[in-house]
């Protein structure tokens, strides 16, 4: 009697695939984003980052992780925090701009968003901040806004912020990748990540049944972190027809919360910044002044060019 292999190669995808003893990088593997990923860090070319006239310089893209930060900045400005004025520079990751020496200096992980504060508290030279959750926390502390000061509210806010940072990779890099971007449809992978994303939506839905916002009655950076990812999914704006596939309408409390945030003018403005896809009237590739929302959206730039 022979022992059957635990993973018969003919059942693998592609059929017959057996992992090598030592992995080597194939630049063509990885699906839609293969050309922007590589197994090493560091700069590929010299390119300094532009610097505008405001103390806060943001280098980003209108993906969910970028939207978190621009929503907070717009909310801070709406509350009257003039020091939150900012320049938002568009980083084209498809062209490898995240691997320029200046960007790597701002974020050694070469991922958007990255921020440089040229007027940090306590003075001194420019201060870099990277990772979207870290940027949210930094700005909330600097301006004393959208982060409760009482121990219970602060702990709840930070717990949900960290929940998002740990959970969203299953939504984006897991479900989104295998459902929409991978070069082949893999039933096991899609089932695995669909189950996890629906579990996460249920976590949110149960919590929001008893809470107006993630930390309770107050709108905080936790909401701003979670909404661009899970609110977008709830609105059926993520990964092609994923909203229908995952039956997102059944999460009624998430739907209520998502629409409530989507109705905030600052959230609407923040969602436009560094955006380069979708409705041209809602694309503001770079933001250097509040008036840019009225004069420099992509539809207006296209009209000027013609």
Image (tube, rainbow, N blue to C red):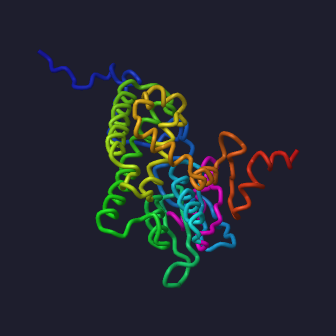
Q: What segment is highlighted magenta in the picture?
A: 82-107
In the picture provided, is 33 more to the left or to the right than 214? Answer: right
In the picture provided, is 148 more to the left or to the right than 30? Answer: left
* Residue 65 image offset from top left, x and y in percent: 50, 52
In the picture provided, is 63 more to the left or to the right than 14? Answer: right
Is 199 above or below relative to 275? above
Is 289 above or below relative to 297? below
* Residue 11 image offset from top left, x and y in percent: 33, 20
Q: What residue is shown at x 41% (from left), y 45% (from top)?
A: 169
- Front one among 40 and 49: 49
Q: What residue is shown at x 42% (from left), y 43% (from top)?
A: 24
- Front one among 77 and 243: 77
Q: What residue is shown at x 41% (from left), y 38% (from top)?
A: 174
- Front one among 16 and 182: 182
* Residue 73 image offset from top left, x and y in percent: 56, 62
Q: What residue is shown at x 57% (from left), y 78% (from top)?
A: 119
Is 206 above or below relative to 51? above
Q: What is the quadrant of the C terminus in the image?
A: top right
Residue reaching furthest to the right: 306
Residue reaching furthest to the bottom: 123
* Residue 230 image offset from top left, x and y in percent: 45, 42
Would you say residue 299 sits in the magenta stretch? no
């Amino acid at each position: 009697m022979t022992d059957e292999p635990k993973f018969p190669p003919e059942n693998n995808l592609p059929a017959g695939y057996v992992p090598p003893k030592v992995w080597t990088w194939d630049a063509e593997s990885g699906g839609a984003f293969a050309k922007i990923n590589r197994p090493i860090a560091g700069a590929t070319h010299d390119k300094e980052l532009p610097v505008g006239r405001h103390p806060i310089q943001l280098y980003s893209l209108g993906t969910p992780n970028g939207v978190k930060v621009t929503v907070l900045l717009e909310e801070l400005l709406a509350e009257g925090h003039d020091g939150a004025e900012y320049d938002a520079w568009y980083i084209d990751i498809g062209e490898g701009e995240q691997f320029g020496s200046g960007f790597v200096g701002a974020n050694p992980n070469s991922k958007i968003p990255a921020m440089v504060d040229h007027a940090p508290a306590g003075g001194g030279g420019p201060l870099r901040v990277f990772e979207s959750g870290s940027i949210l926390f930094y700005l909330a502390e600097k301006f004393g806004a959208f982060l409760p000061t009482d121990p219970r509210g602060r702990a709840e806010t930070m717990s949900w912020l960290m929940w998002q940072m740990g959970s969203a990779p299953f939504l984006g890099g897991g479900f989104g990748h295998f459902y929409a971007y991978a070069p082949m449809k893999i039933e096991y992978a899609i089932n695995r990540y669909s189950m996890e994303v629906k579990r996460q939506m249920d976590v949110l839905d149960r919590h929001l049944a008893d809470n107006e916002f993630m930390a309770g009655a107050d709108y905080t950076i936790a909401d701003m972190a979670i909404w661009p990812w899970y609110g977008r999914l709830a609105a059926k704006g993520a990964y092609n027809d994923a909203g229908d596939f995952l039956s997102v309408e059944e999460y009624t409390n998430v739907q209520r919360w998502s629409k409530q945030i989507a109705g905030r003018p600052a959230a609407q403005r923040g969602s436009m910044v560094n955006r380069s896809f979708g409705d041209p009237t809602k694309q503001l590739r770079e933001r250097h002044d509040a008036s840019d929302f009225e004069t420099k959206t992509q539809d207006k730039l296209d009209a000027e060019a013609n």
